[in-house]
Amino acid sequence: MGRPRGPKGASQGWRSAWRQRFRAVPHRYALMAAYWFAVVATVLFSVFYGWHSWRRYEKTGIDRLMLTTSLIATATHDDLDREASGLRFLAHHLAVIHPRHHPARARRLLSEYQEVSPEVASAELIAPDGRVIASTAVPKGRPLPDFRQDARIWPSLERALAHPGLHIHRPIHGPLVDRWVIGFSDTVMGPGGRPRFLVTTPIRFGNFEALFAHLSLPSGLAVGILRSDDYIEGRAPVPRGQLAALLDRPQTGILAETLKRHPHAIQGVFSGWVSSDREYRYGVFVRIAGYPLVAFADVPRAQWMAQWWHRQAEIPLIFLIVALAFSGYAYRQVQVLAVRWEAEAARRADFLKNLATHDPLTGLLNRKGLYPVLQRAMARAEREGRLLVVGFLDIDDFKGINDRYGHAAGDTVLKTLAKRLERALRGTDHVARLGGDEFVLLIEGLRQKADLAPVVAHLKAALDGPFYADPREIAVRVSLGVAFFPLDALDAEHLIGRADRAMYAAKERAADDEPGWVRLYNHDMPSDPDARPDGLIDD
């Protein structure tokens, strides 16, 4: 049996389909709002937690760096004070003996000082003209150098000779000791403010680094001392193979720039590219009181962020992933529920529609469901120029079957008849039950009346088989009346009515008149079903 064909609509995209599906979900807007609120809240919370934990970690890290740098500044200040005290003591004793007239006694004092100061690489007494009066680095009897001839050393010594007191020189590769040293000197002035001599006790660079040895420096942390002229005075650790490059030229990185921007700042924070390591670092600085030096400590940004990530950010990340996964799972469940709700709603709608348009006993179209199908079939027949057959079929003496075998057997006969009619007709045809034992057949697409004969023959063959009910065999005889659209009527009511009149005419056939089970409507048929009309179809 053919089913009513729904209207053909344009195919919709997945968004439109999902939107329609979601509209079927109860409280759909509340569910959608709750889902997106959970997603946005989770992301915002994770971002806020990450930002807050980073700021907290950054502050804690800066506090640690500041503590380390303050310790370095204090230790350096104490060591410089000790070196300055010893150097002043040495300069005072040299001034007493008039060293320019007694160079041997001066050399002995220098040697004794070096013996009690193991960090001192050598000790020299230098005249205002740059000549070395005495030196522990030059063996006795050998000529002493003239530093005025050394362009690397003399400018610094010349500046120191112009001012009395302690001077700290930038690191150089000492020509007398053949190693990197940090120069310390004290200038002794004579009457009239003219320099008498300068005594210098350069410290081995490695010994100056030992100032930081008592600190437990974590991996990646760099500490050091920077001069006011931007030269490195000391650093730990020293970049491998880059000692000369580190000490020979002034620094141009972020620390030097920060100190220039804040010349009076006692301490501060910096972040940026560091020229000594050629990497981005976070750090702090502390000025060393009484000396033109700044202590600093810095760490690579990548290392700091990696530590923050492993210690702080993994928790919100895991929380974010789990929360988003849970939200996605919940949203997916909403989708599944939406599909189920939609299917259930469609099932209920189909069920209710089916109740309204279909016969509950046989599943065929009822009178209400038949008329829209008939109207569409009539429109197609008119559009295509074909004939539409409306057949009215009725069981002869159905009341006798009910009385003889019972209503349950009668229902079984009706259901069996409905199934046979469905199987016998073509896919484009339709069967409906109007009530009781009355059935209507719609046969479409005929070019002429004669095309109905093979259809009727096939229908007759399907209905001739025996009918059974628990498990009795029941003899069933049917009558069929036929009306053609548009030949016999132009509207549904008249078509069905005239097919009904033809059916009653078929009922009046003789008991042995098998071909007479089908009658075609003609206008001469009386409306009184007791009259016997003409118009048999030849089988």
Image: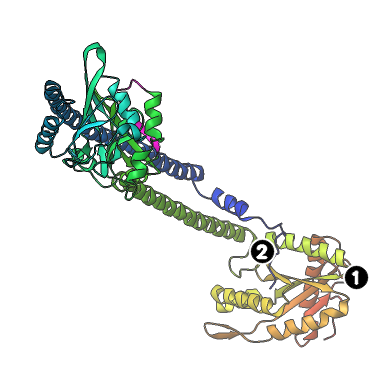
Residue 344 in the image, given as x and y percentages of width and height:
52, 58
32 vs 203, left or right, is: right
Left or right? Give the position of 520 relative to 243.
right
Kind of residue at badge 2: Asn
* Residue 127 in which image quadrant: top left
Q: Which residue is mark 2?
A: 366
The dot on residue 524 is: 1
Instruction: Report helix, strand or loop for mark 2.
Output: loop
Cα gap from disc 2 to disc 1, whole angstroms: 30 Å
Residue 363, by quadrant, is: bottom right
Q: Is residue 510 visible?
A: no
Q: Amino acid at mark 1?
A: Asp
Residue at point 62% right, 74% down? 414
**Foreground of the two, 249 or 322:** 249
Locate the N terminus and report the quarter of the image it occupies.
bottom right
* First to last magenta residue range: 263-274
Q: Is residue 191 magenta?
A: no
Q: Earlier in the sequence, mark 2 or mark 1?
A: 2
At horizontal 80% and vertical 61% (from top left) the residue drawn is 492
Q: Residues within 10 Å of mark 1 (few under 14, many from 20)?
A: few
